Image (tube, helix red, strand yellow):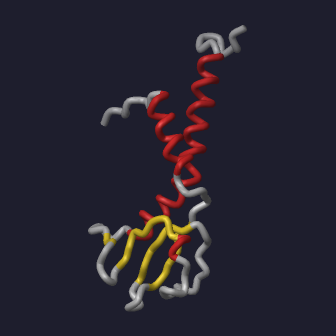
Amino acid sequence: MTAPDPLTEEELDELDELAGAATPGPWFVRSLDDTDAMSIVAVSTVPDTGLSERWPGFDHHDIVAATLVQQPRYVDAADERWDENAHFIAAARSSVPRLIAEIRRLRHLMETTNPTSGRTRN
């Protein structure tokens, strides 16, 4: 397996713009219920209460994504990784901007360090 091509500065800029335009974080995974008391796995701007609230007992304005909506069957990944997908989406909200910043920091460090001596260029 070959390593993927490094991200270009333009690609980093695009990711940074996408992250900046998205609903502010942090995001959280919430377990909710729908009208027929079947599970909803959602990504929300507010933490899970542990109460598995049924609609309308939760504010739909807090939900930014769903990885499982069973009734009616609107969202249901074939591999049944609803929880895993929700956790990834929620983590990405905070991690992607940090990863972009880290890539840029490391690139700057590489540009200012002489790779043969390990000393900073003047």
Q: Residue furthest right?
A: 122
Quadrant of the rendered image containing residue 109: top right
Q: Is 106 drawn above or below residue 80 in the view shown?
A: above
Q: Is 56 drawn above or below residue 31 in the view shown?
A: below
Q: Residue furthest top?
A: 122
Q: Residue at x 61, y 72 (%)?
A: 47
Quadrant of the rendered image containing residue 25: bottom right
Q: Residue at x 56, y 46 (%)?
A: 20
Q: Residue at x 60, y 29 (%)?
A: 106
- Classify residue 67 as left or right of residue 60: left
In this figure, what is the number of numbered marks? 0
- Classify residue 62 as left or right of residue 119: left
Q: Quadrant of the N terminus?
A: top left
Q: Residue furthest left?
A: 78
Considering depth in this image, is 64 or 51 the residue closer to the camera?
64
Q: Position of residue 42 (x, y in %)?
A: 47, 71
Q: Quadrant of the C terminus?
A: top right
Q: Is 67 drawn above or below residue 88 in the view shown?
A: below
Q: Position of residue 116 (x, y in %)?
A: 60, 11
Q: Position of residue 18 (x, y in %)?
A: 49, 45
Q: Position of residue 117 (x, y in %)?
A: 65, 11
